[in-house]
Image (cartoon, coloured by chain):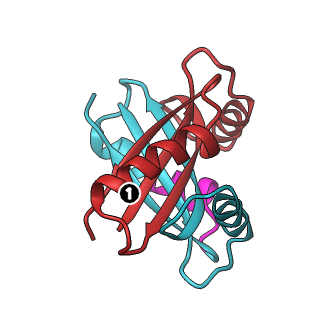
Chain colours: A red, B cyan
Amino acid sequence: MLAKVFVTLREGVLDPQGKAIHHATTTIGYQGITEIRQGKYFEITFDDSLDKAQAQEQLEKLAHDVLSNPVIEDYEIQLSAD
Amino acid sequence: MLAKVFVTLREGVLDPQGKAIHHATTTIGYQGITEIRQGKYFEITFDDSLDKAQAQEQLEKLAHDVLSNPVIEDYEIQLSAD
């Protein structure tokens, strides 16, 4: 089973890295971009010892406790069947 | 318009950061995880001066030239209407 986890900074939390990328893009001529925010992305492969519900549970815990900092970050989870 | 860009290491490219996270998860008791790979995630907001085709074009160029290193990384783009 393949799972995807997206971690993004919460709204209102400053994102200097995203701001730097945005600044760079305007400097080199990109137009029409209002904002760029950078987050993290994880691909997690589960073996067949877990069913989907168990994998989902592990994944929620993993995303909350390990992959993100809930004080300043939000996360989103996608668990696919294959 | 909101666009999402996912940048992942190409298959076969070593991902020490993902390996370290995977190792940490097994150490603290997570089970059934075969692999974790870390990538990057960007949210890009376009203003209304661009139509969808123009935004898509800018986005392709941005993802290829700025946000990823095509030698070792793949990228995926999602452009939504809102």
Residue closer to the observer: B44 or A10: A10
Give the percent coordinates (x, y) of residue B51.
Answer: 29, 35
Give the residue displayed 36% in from the left and 24% down from the top: B48
Position of the C terminus of chain B, as image quadrant, is top left
Position of the N terminus of chain B, as image quadrant, is top left
Give the residue displayed 43% in from the left and 55% down from the top: A4
Left or right: A23 in relation to B35: right
Q: Main SS of the magenta segment?
A: helix
The magenta region covers B60-70
> Does residue B19 lie above or below B54 as drawn?
below
Give the residue displayed 64% in from the left and 24% down from the top: A72
Give the residue displayed 58% in from the left and 33% down from the top: A37
- Examine the rendering and report whether any part of residue B21 can be seen: yes
Left or right: B33 in relation to B22: left
Circle 1 residue? A55
Give the percent coordinates (x, y) of residue A43.
Answer: 49, 61
> Does residue A54 lie above or below A22 as drawn?
below
Instruction: Kindly identify which chain the residue marked by label 1 belongs to.
Output: A
Left or right: B32 in relation to A67: left
Tell me where residue B60 sits by quadrant: bottom left
- At label 1, which amino acid type do we have? Ala
- Examine the rendering and report whether any part of residue B42 can be seen: no
Residue closer to the observer: B14 or A68: A68
Give the percent coordinates (x, y) of residue A12.
Answer: 60, 14
Residue farthest to the front, as pictured = B29
